[in-house]
Amino acid sequence: MVQLCCPWCGPRPGNEFSCGGTTGIARPPLECSDEEWARYLFLRQNPKGEHAERWRHGYGCGQWFNVLRDTVSHEVRAVYGIAEPRPGAGSSP
Amino acid sequence: MSGYRLAAPAGAWIDRNRPLRFSFDGRPVQGFAGDTVASALLAGGHAMVARSTKLHRPRGVFACGPEEPNALLDVGLHGERTPNTRATEIDAAEGLVCRPGNAWPGLKLDIAALNARYAALLPAGFYYKTFMKPHWHLYEPVIRALAGTGRAADAPDPARYDAVSRQVELLVIGGGAAGTQAALDAARAGAQVLLLEASPQLAAADALRDAGVECHTRCTVFGLYDHGLAAAAQGVGGAVRERLWTIRARRTIVATGAFERPMLFPDNDRPGVMLAGAVEQYARRYGVACGRRIVVATACDSGYRTAQALVAAGIDVAAIVDARERSGAEAPAGVAVHRASTIVAVAGKRAVQGVTIAPQAGGARHEIEADCIASAGGWTPAVNLYSMAGGKLRWVAESSMFVPATELPGITTVGACAGDFGAAHSPGVVPADHRPSRAALASLGRKPGKVFVDLQADVSAGDVALAAREGYRSVEHLKRYTTTGMATDQGKTSNVNALVLMGAQTKRTPDQVGTTRFRPPFKPVTLNTIAGGRSGERFKPLKRMPGHAWHAARGAAMEEFGGWLRPAAYPRAGEDLVTAAEREALQVRTEVGVFEGSPLGKIEVIGPDAAGFLDLMYVGTMSTLAVGGARYGLLLNENGVIFDDGIVGRLGPEHFLVNTTSGGAERVALAFEEWLQCEYGDHRVLVAPVTSAWGNVTVSGPKAWQLLQAAGFDAALAPAAMKHMTLRECSYGGVAMRVLRASFCGELGYEINLPAPHTQALLDRLWVVGQGLGVAPYGVEALMIMRTEKGFLHVGGDTDGTTLPGDVGMDRGIAAKAANFVGRRSLLRPAARDPRRMQLVGLLPRDGRTRLPVGGHMAASRPPAPIEGFVTSSHHSPVLGHPVALGMLANGRARIGEAVTVWHLGRAIEAEVAKTPFYDPAGERLHGLG
Amino acid sequence: MTADRDADRDAEPLRTRYSAWNLLAASRRDHRDWASAWRDAEPKARYDVVIVGGGGHGLATAYYLAKNHGVRDVCVLEAGWIGGGNTGRNTTIVRSNYLYPESARLYDFSLRQYETLSRELNFNIMFSQRGVLTLAHSRHDLDAQSRWANAMLCNGIDAELLDANQVRALEPRLNFGDAARPARFPILGGFVQRRGGPARHDAVAWGYARGASALGVDIVQNCAVTGFLKQGARVAGVATPRGEIRADKVALAVAGHSSVLAGLAGFQLPVTSYALQAMVSEPVKPVLNTVTLSPALGAYWSQSDKGEVVIGGALDHFPSYAQRGSFDVMQQVVAATCEMFPSLGRLRLLRQWAGIVDVVADSSPIIGATPVPGLYINCGWGTGGFKAIPVGGWTLAHQLATGRVHDLAAPFQLERFSSGRFVDEAAAAGIAH
């Protein structure tokens, strides 16, 4: 079971959290095409390696935050605010 | 008879002042406190203690620890019966009852021993090649009856288990020499250290305690998981049988030692063939000689050290047979050493009687009388935990072992498990493949016996050769095809021999073959221990309403609804649930009923942007609600699917009270928070779930207001003063309350929200006051009857994970709405506009009598047939006097009046598509008239 | 082509047919004359079809290409050892108790193939039709199961609704509670598909490999695909550490690695990969009769022919390619086991493992074309791919050979994510099996 460092509560066991999947996917406007809407809802890179994802500290402060985690080793590389850009990369997470 | 008890004071772990007796295979066995069942059996001369899994060959104790492959016993009776228990890990105790697991009717007369005669027909994977005609089902019952090495308990386990959770700076796994030293060094440097030792005794217990190291014995770490998590199982005894440890450690030192690798020779599975280190430990720990005349078969320097220890204990060592030319260790005086030689035959079936040896180069064979063979073929570092944590291995050719190759963050390996045995215990030069050569076997003059690789799975060297021949050459294919390493000892003493053999067969070195993946558990762990006491409500708690005791006192039949314990109905004498619910529903419609709706979700949504935010969440528009107004709202997910509904009330310009379904309270609050924090971070809104802070007492029926008035509620709540779908704050009995005029049953209704601790008092008051008005409590089933009569939607009952708002007639007004609410875009997809979509409709039985079964399907002809729809809700309506139902039907709204057939498990019921509401279509009863 | 022969083997033809008679005959020669189950081939420079992924689906595709369509110039490329992915890690359940007609047709076709697969492949896959039972713990569950069973009957699939007594007769060790300790999850009834049950997963992979190899298909292990060769926009082959391999058509059957391969080809899939755990107990004499599922507890159980109690649960909670699961998820599934089978609590957990499952929003597969011309895919089975190996292979082979989508696969194309025409079996696939 992983351990995550919640920005507010500090290191806590993984079962206090829930994972919200890939972070930073922009919601397209109502006028978008069916394909664009499908991309937003369903298409994902699903990387074997570093993944920028969002987590919520459900059994704790209830706050959402972002995590850079390796999907093979589960190593947590970074924890950053929900509205912050992905560390290292450009502005698109 | 071979083994015997050495004279005192031999045996550091036993207490000769405390003798005991236990039963094995129906016979009494003597032992001492401190013995294991294995040591006591050996001391008593019991050579054969088990039968092997497939071939039912006689087997004896092989090892002295968790790597024991043979001596698997069923221990205990009834609910405490535990199969597959290693005799080496059972504490001998007075009155203990043990049976061999895999023998019937008894150990000596085991019927399935016939299998051994047909061993040639039963090579690895034989079942893939046959048992196909006429059908596998014909053979399977026999196979299943023969499989399994023990019998499970026949009653629930009465024992208790508990769990401990720790955070430590340093976890040391293993209290041998290396682990002890590592713990002492760290503790003296100021670290907080926890040391866990698997065996019952810790040699350096005093020194560790003095250094401030917390130590526990009988505690086996069985898994290393992400981010420094370790899990261990501890045998406690007494009030608690076993304890689960979960430890989060900043640093971990793995000092798990090594397992001895046995020699491979024909009939190396006979009772009396044992690991050399085990023979030594039985003498040292338990004062047991495993045989009267011992032959040491070795390819490793430790065989010599074993011989020395045994001679020093006064045990007769007949010879050392070393497969190598040279040794780095000395033989004890007076013991013959046969170099470059191997065992080519073992005499005796139920116990070793002697060995035949021959030179590897070929030549004359030689017989030696013996009743025990101490087998020392090398060492296998216990790299399991290190490997689970992601560590990679490398092969050391000189000593023929896999050792840790990489550094892992936060995890260090020390001692034998890292390949570091220290000078005194160095294995020396060990060949990988130390089987008898062809030349040596040739000198036997007859076909040699089977060479066993995995004792418990009955896998032989011939099976490994067969696997190679048939293409199962990957080490993982080898394992799955032959099942080597898949028995309860998990290949601890066989995996390396198996992969060495596969390498020999396919001209690969052992590291080219590699090892199979190491996975938890390191050793089998009791299911109840892992569960850690989470049973019953500790597995999943039941939520109880604030008024629970009140309902119980009224005779409520409680059932679980969405995680809450709620009254389904209040059956009186002679009533079942359905008749009670029908009576209650009728009473609500004619007089007045009282219901507790506390599980309904309640969420306060507060802030300058609250109104706009709710417009983004709901299908309908909440921002246009007047203060004091309330509106039904539907919530969709981004796929456009209905996932919850409820009434939203407005308490103030920036203050809304959201109601959700009872099962949906948490997920709605979660959804709101997710949108707020992740998408609409600039919205100034506070979402506060208050479901359990507020109780809900619902009063429904034509006399609802009369009841509240009689109880003393403010006249401002009267129907004339307070319209349907409005919300008022009031005070009653000094308690602040929020009253919503709403109705899920269709009668005049008031939902009184009040601080949860006051719920029972209000229920009591209304009950007392209501006696003269014909008040009755009503449960969930009665409510379901009434809302079905009205055709009101039940999310999760009438809807499923595909239902869109248009399917239930709730998409009017979407086009006109401005906000891009959750799910809106999905409603524009082609599938959402398909005219064949199923729609919610009413259904009535043609004969006016037959209740349409929930789940019954509408189809144009007898099934199998294309599905037109299905029944979602169905009840007998007491007020109408006939059954009513709701269902989903393809293009249903355009088919009102049409005849349909409902099929249920082959039975046809004629029905008609009908408009809803069935009862009070104009909705007049809401106002309390009539 | 590498031949593997014992030094002292005769020049007689090797034994290839599996039968009791041949087993007896082979025993006389110490089983030294069995032929290799499949050829471990060296890849050629070019094939008509390259299939990426040597699991059940990939191997079945190759088999049916050769068997049904006579397309034999086929290569199956497997990064590791065949059947080493999800095919070797599942809980071996075959069933077709799905809700929607599209799923029912798909999975029941597969189940019917399983019924005769041992004969078809001359390899005993040990399909044991001992029934798949789903428990009802509330009256809501009973209603939902009534819908489910009737839907199955409309779709022509066997289903029976059972009351509590009938469930107890079928699986007596379930926790029905008693007056002293009422069950936290009372069992009110259930429904059963009698034709469902476990099969030996490894045998399915090995059986299809042997069948395909015998028909001329090349099976290449230890050969990962590291990139795609393109001719314009069209796929023209694959790049591997053992050289480039050209092909007219390439098919992906790589389950949890689908997004990785898709990424190499330049497109994204509606797939997220998760760990799915499973575990077995030490083997014991028979204690369980059927496959039992409890949706309320999120776990399911059966007993293998070796005697091990096989336990599975729901997905782990975050995307992972680690092939190992979280301790807390495993603990929850074990606690569910002890709750449902109180007399089995003293058994010991022997082995646990995890696969990488490719999860798709509507829990239905994707079988068909990709945005890259010439590149096809079979993925998205999520937690339920083992039962579908025959139909996955059959339909993909059909498309590769004829260029047309097979009728059974038509509802399961990528375009459904844009149109919204999902086949949402979330109810049926509420937990993994």
Image (cartoon, coloured by chain):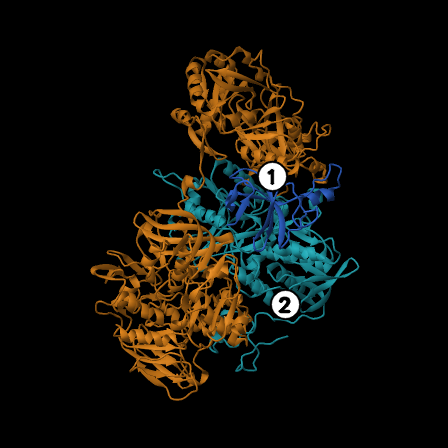
Q: Position of residue A75 (x, y in %)?
A: 56, 53
Q: Secondary structure at mark 2?
A: strand
**Viewer-proximal residue, C298 or A36?**
A36
Q: Position of residue B527 (x, y in %)?
A: 41, 51
Crowding near pointer 1: few (<14 within 10 Å), some, many (20+)? some
At label 1, which amino acid type do we have? Gly
Kindly indicate whether the residues beneath marks 2 and 1 are on one polypeptide chain: no
Above/below status of C245 relative to B854: below
**Chain B: drawing colour:** orange
Q: Is residue B506 visible?
A: yes
Q: Label 1: chain?
A: B
Q: Secondary structure at mark 1?
A: loop
- For residue C17, side relative to residue C226 (left or right): left
Residue B801 circle label: 1
- How many numbered circles does the render carry? 2
Give the residue at mark 2. C219
**Chain A: drawing colour:** blue
> How far apart are the alpha carbons under marks 2 and 1?
42 Å
**Viewer-proximal residue, B372 or C55?**
B372
